[in-house]
Structures are given as structure tokens and as C-alpha cells.
Image (cartoon, helix red, strand yellow):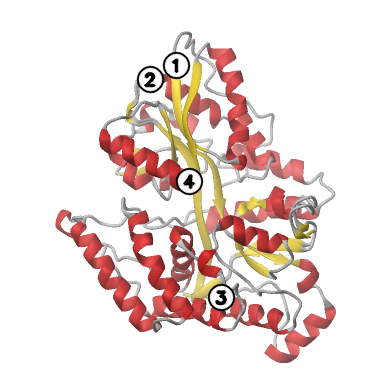
Amino acid sequence: WYGWYSYFQDPASCKVAGHFDLARGPVGAAGDIHTGWAGAHAFSIPKAAEDKVGAAQLIKFLTSEEIAYEEAARGSLPVRDDVWGLVIEDAAKSSVPLDKSRLELAQLQVGTDFFTPPLFADWISFTNLWYPTLQSIILGDVTVDEGLTEAVDQTRQLMDEAGYYAAGESQQTLEKPAVAPAAPVGEAQYAGLDKDLTGQTIRMANIGGSPYETMYDQIKLFEEKTGAKVETVFLGDGFQIDRYLKENYAAGTVDFDVAWNHTSFMSQYAPFVEDLNQYFTPEELAAFSAPIIKAATIDGALQLIPRHADISALHYRTDLFGDADLQAAFEAEYGYPLAPPETIEQMQQMAEFFVAQGVVDYGTEFAGKEEALAGRFYELLVANGGNYFDENFEPVFDSDAGKMTAQWMKDLYEAGAIPSDTPNLLWPEVAQNFCDDKVAFYLEWYGWYSYFQDPASCKVAGHFDLARGPVGAAGDIHTGWAGAHAFSIPKAAE
């Protein structure tokens, strides 16, 4: 994810600070689909919220142009088209060329490679069911065919018991959006400060952690300008806040007016949050990235207002890919130049090559458990022309594309091209591996950029670049797992 950038660029935390670059994710067997697992952190309003008007005003403030600009300046990817131009203009003044090229690549990916997991309420239940089997495939405990057959059977049972087939549910799909036109560059503005909320208390349940909490310091300005008081009733990481929201929604114990949301999680919250079209005008919504607003809409109801987006891009070490001796050795062995991989197949070849040359511990890597593993598999699966489910939610990932994707992961593990402790790794661990000068390239979120570029935290700061995710066997689908953190308003809000 791009979100690791500042960590990776800090020499104090990352050995490869200054020695990596980013590229678009490779394509898989589909031929034209790049990797690009994406999402957006967001806010929603629970249907049970007590103060929906106040909640909407606070969300307008927290997603306003000025706040979005400040958060993007710290490394997060903007979800507002009017902020992209501002941060790219700022980055052009940096002495680090990657600061600007990273954002230009991210804007391309968000506009063309952005795809979310299948939109259904039991996505997390599915990933918890699936990832242990995928681990077994990678470790060689079962064959690819055996593992996929077992996982599809288990998934079909899960979906049947959850009532998907009986209810006639169908999977939502997203058309590939066009790249949004560049917005005019101007001075960022606040929003949501135009109502007197004196005497009102707005309660929030939000995602916590250092990448997210800096924004909350701005709430003091909202309180000062509106007269409202904002209380935080819960802060936790993504999985903790997800559990907290589900427990309170199910029990009818909602005592908050603004709730965290995310494009990958929103389907399960849909019965409990307000349609935000009621609180945001078309003119206000037009400022946000159209593909994300479209992804956040279910049956015409806008589930969330995005806070910031992320999408996976290929992060690669410029000192390794630019080494003349390595370039000569690679071309002699594989018959084509050493450059950021453009296909998933090239990713495997280059990962094995760098390890064989002894210049890094691992050629590439990926998080190896929970939704993180299932999501990365999904990103590659789509690029290879597959999907987890068909239009009727029948599991179909035991297809040729699924077998190819699982085999790719297994082959990398058996070749020693990824960490031996992959099944224990999540986002922080893989990011630290990159910063510790152990990895040649991998798919990561843009949100890490400021961390990666900080020499105090990342040894490769200044020595990496980004590229668009590669294509897979489908031929024209780039990788690009994407999403957006966001805000919602519970229906129970006061």
C-alpha cells in the first residue's frame, strides 16, 4: 500500500530508504488486468445515531478539501479530485523526484486499476474460512487442486447457510472507470462549519493508529466554529473497529453518531447506516473521486463519505533494478531487460533471480494471513481473469485462474523467494521487511510513502520507485487492490 511511503523513506526505520521505487502492479494471465487491490477508509452515519444532522456536518468537515489536503500531505492518497492537483503541485517542489511520480502513478491507478473485494456482507467470514487453506497450498501441505476444491466446497456451504442463494442475491460489479479530469488547482477550503450546533454532542467510533489519528486533532477547529462537542467513544485498528461496530449494530446498542466505514467492509453495515445522499448535495459529492462514490453506492444508497483512498502499486528498489551487473546477469538468463515487472509471471522470475544473486533476502513478499492474504490472492486472481464468485455468488475460484494464482504463491514459497514466515506476516511486518533492505520489490499501498521516504525509519528511503501493478493472464487487467477509509452515519444516530 502507498500508505507505508513515509515509513519506508525514513532511514531510522527502514534500511532501504532511498533505494526503492514504485511501479504499477503487474498483469496476470488475463493479459490486460493489472494488480490493484484497493479500498478507501471512510465515515458512515449509523441508522441508530442520535444526531444525524450534526454527524453529517462533522463528516463534511473531516472530508473537506482542506482536511483531505492536510491528510494527503502526510502520505495518504486523496479521494477528492480537487486535492490531487494540490498535492502533486506541492510534491513537484520536493528534492525527491519520487514524491511527485508516486502521486502521478497513484492517480492513474485509482482512476483505472481500482477494484474492491466482492461486495457482500460476509467478506470477512469468507476470508477467515479461505486463508488457512491458501496457507496450506503455499506451504505444500495440500496440492493446489485439492486445496481449491476444498475451499470452494466450504465457501458454497457458507454462502448457502448465510442465505445468499435462497434470497437470490447477486454480486455487485464495478465497470472500469475513466480517468477523472484534472481539477483546477486552488486553495483548499473547509466545509461543514456553516451551522450553529451549540449544545450538541456528536459521538464518534473510529479507526485508530498513528496514520489515522492525526486528522482528529482538527476536530478542535470544528468544535470552535460550530459550538458542538465531539466525543470519541471507540478507537481501534481496522479489525477491532469492525468487531465493535458489528456488535453494537446487532445488539441495538449504538451510542455514536459518526462511524468508521471502508469500501471493503461496508456491505455488512448497509442495513444500519443512513443513505448519505440525504445529507450531501450532488455538488458536494462531485468533488470526490467518481469511481469511489460509485463503489460506495449499494442499490442507490450512498453508504459512506470517503476519507482517503489506497491502492496497491509495485514498489521496487531502484538501486537493484539499476545495477549494471544485475541487469546484464538477468538479461543473459531470461532474455529480456531487467525492469519493473509488467506481468505476474515476470514478478516470479525476478523474485527468484534477486534471491539467487544474493543481493536480498527475499525477491518479493505479501502478507500471509487473514483478510490480507485472501485480498492479495483476490487481486492476482482478477488480474489472471478469475474471481471469487460468479454473478449468482457461486464460488468459482477453483478455476484455471484460481489454480494459476495459488500455484504462483506456492512456487514463490518453495523457491525461497518470499519469507519463510509468510503465514505470520501482516501489513506492518512486510513493510518493515522492505525498509530493512530485505526485499527487492512487492505490491504495497501508497499510504506508506511518507514512512518509506523517511531516512529515520527506512533504510531504502530515496532508493525506491513506484510503478503500476502488472497484468496477469487476462492480458489487460492490472493488479490494483484498492479501497477507501470513510465515515458513515448510523440510522440510530441522535
What label does residue 201 carry, if any? 1
* 282, 361: nearer the viewer: 361
* Residue 333, image x, y percentages: 71, 91
- Label 1 amino acid? Thr
Judging by the rendered image, the residue that carries numbered circle 4 is 238
Residue 221 lies left or right of residue 274; in this view the side is right
Q: Residue at x 79, y 50 (%)?
A: 456
Label 4 Cα crowd, 10 Å radius (few <14 / some 14-19 / many 20+): some
Q: Residue at x 30, y 75 (%)?
A: 150
Which of the two labelled residues, at mark 3 and mark 2, occupies the earlier sequence position?
A: 2
Distance between the Cα atoms at labels 1 and 2?
A: 8 Å
Q: Is residue 300 visible?
A: no
Distance between the Cα atoms at labels 2 and 4?
A: 24 Å
The label nearer to you, 4 versus 3, is 4
Judging by the rendered image, the residue that carries numbered circle 3 is 344
Q: Residue at x 64, y 77 (%)?
A: 351
Distance between the Cα atoms at labels 3 and 2?
A: 49 Å
Distance between the Cα atoms at labels 4 and 3?
A: 29 Å
* Residue 286, image x, y percentages: 50, 36
Evaluate if marks 1 and 2 touch, with contact meaning CB atoms under 8 Å apart: yes
- Label 4 amino acid? Gly
* 309, 291: nearer the viewer: 309
Which of the two labelled residues, at mark 4 and mark 3, occupies the earlier sequence position?
A: 4
Height in image: 365 above or below 330? above
Q: Is residue 234 visible?
A: yes
Height in image: 135 above or below 369? below
